[in-house]
């Protein structure tokens, strides 16, 4: 039996995923939540075989959740489910300990395939993201523009790109306002951007965020 913890802040999506998984004879949903901090706690309480993790959560992003879970319970397999198909997200999440990365537009059959594969300890990356990763290997300069950013700079970029103020980003990431301003300056310099509007356009163009 594959024991799964489902983490997604959209109630309808989470309920639908839970129903799909529970309909399978070899899968059991042991808990579900819409928050990253609670996901880390529930993972310690239930010790699931797999965490099905949404990347975008209100309190922590998927990278931070995956890092904390992997550090505390390396045996737990993590499959990230996200609307963003940026390959840099996938690379960083796998480095952080995740075993799988797939788009929310995937079919139910593909999701079940990924759950079973990742639960066994294998790696699964959805075809559209894998194609981008493989495509990078054949390029003279394989790195994406955002590859020059640290994980924390990516987190600041994404939140500023979505329209959060420096003070709001500081509160969300438990940082000082001056520290966020320093990160912002570094991001602008590294990406040769001028202001927050440029940040937003860059993040949308690179598939790091959407504003729907």
Image: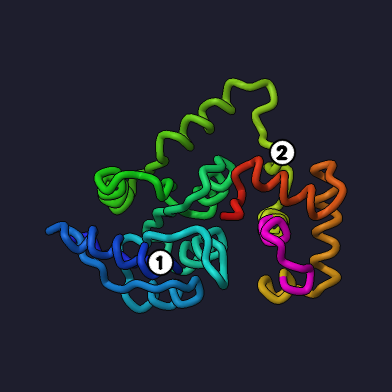
The numbered mark at residue 145 is 2
- Where does label 1 land, which residue? 7
Q: Is residue 69 left or right of residue 121?
A: right
User: SS class of the residue under badge 1?
Assistant: strand
Residue appearing at x 33%, y 71% in the figure: 47
Q: Quadrant of the N terminus?
A: bottom left
What's the CA distance linking mark 1 and mark 2?
29 Å
Residue 80 picture location, percent across and down: 43, 54
Residue situated in front as seen by the camera: 204 or 117: 204
The answer to whether residue 164 is magenta is yes
Q: Is residue 120 visible?
A: no
| The magenta segment | 158-168
In the picture, residue 137 is in which quadrant?
A: top right
**Which residue is at the far left?**
25
Residue 85 picture location, percent across and down: 51, 43
Residue appearing at x 38%, y 72% in the figure: 43
Residue situated in front as seen by the camera: 191 or 194: 194
* Number of numbered discs: 2
């Amino acid at each position: 039996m594959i024991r799964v913890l489902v983490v997604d802040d959209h109630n309808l999506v989470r309920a639908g995923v839970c129903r799909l998984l529970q309909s399978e004879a070899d899968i059991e949903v042991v808990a579900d939540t819409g928050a990253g901090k609670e996901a880390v706690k529930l993972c310690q309480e239930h010790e699931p075989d797999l965490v099905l993790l949404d990347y975008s959560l209100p309190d922590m992003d998927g990278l931070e959740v995956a890092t904390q879970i992997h550090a505390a319970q390396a045996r737990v397999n993590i499959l990230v489910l996200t609307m963003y198909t940026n390959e840099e997200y996938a690379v960083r999440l796998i480095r952080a300990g995740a075993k799988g990365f797939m788009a929310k537009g995937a079919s139910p059959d593909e999701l079940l395939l990924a759950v079973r594969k990742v639960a066994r300890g294998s790696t699964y990356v959805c075809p559209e993201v894998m194609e981008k990763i493989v495509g990078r290997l054949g390029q003279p300069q394989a790195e994406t523009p955002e590859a020059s950013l640290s994980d924390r700079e990516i987190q600041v970029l994404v939140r500023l790109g979505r329209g959060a103020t420096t003070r709001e980003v500081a509160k969300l990431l438990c940082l000082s306002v001056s520290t966020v301003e320093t990160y912002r300056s570094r991001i602008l310099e590294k990406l040769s951007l001028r202001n927050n509007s440029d940040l937003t356009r860059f993040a949308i163009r690179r598939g790091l965020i959407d504003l729907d």
